[in-house]
Amino acid sequence: FGLFWRLGQAWGHVSWGLGAYTVVQAIGLAFDCSLVLVYLRKRGAPLIFLWLVTLFFACSYPIVASIPTMSKDSLWALVMTPLSLIFIEACLTRGKVLKRLPVLLTFVILAFLFLAIKRTGVEILLFSGFFLTVLTLVPTHYVHPVRVRRFRPVNIATALAWIGGTAWL
């Protein structure tokens, strides 16, 4: 928010910076809502459900009011939405989607922003990171014991690095 405040001062009046902040928030909210709708459609949601979600996005006061009131949590929500969608996809694919480098880099960058914007992000990422780690480590179908033993040190080291990294931040 301070960046837009200073930008407005550079433009001659603080209101210009606040207006730019509002426009950036509105664009971000539109991007997040469309991202959610595209993801739901990709997952096979029925068209009537997508219309109901669109109606919810358009009429829900907490969503719509975050822009003109310049809610301090709206920037956090703009980062949280794509991070949550990547997290959901990682859970559904048991971590396989994170093997793609662009997805992994996006996930790490969004996680860093998530932590930097608000302190509550630490607890959320620690808990969800633990959940994702357990989900990827515990097999839900039969896996040959030799394969489990072979990857156990790598999985445990990765889990400890994730937990240590998020705790440090």
Image: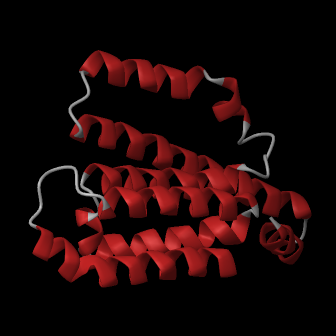
Residue 125 image position (x, y, % from top left): 58, 62
Nearest the viewer among 14 and 4 is: 4
Residue name at image x 90 percent, y 65 percent: 13
Q: Is residue 126 left or right of residue 87?
A: right
Residue name at image x 76 percent, y 64 percent: 119
Count how many numbered circles sit on residues in the image.
0
Nearest the viewer among 140 and 8 is: 140
Residue 96 image position (x, y, % from top left): 23, 64
User: Compared to 132, does 33 lie above or below?
Assistant: above
Residue 95 image position (x, y, % from top left): 29, 63
Residue 169 is at least partly visible in this image: no
Q: Is residue 70 left or right of residue 50?
A: right
Residue name at image x 67 percent, y 65 percent: 122
For the C terminus, the quadrant is: bottom right
Residue 16 image position (x, y, % from top left): 81, 60
Nearest the viewer among 29 and 14 is: 29
Residue 8 is at least partly visible in this image: yes
Q: Is residue 130 left or right of residue 154?
A: right
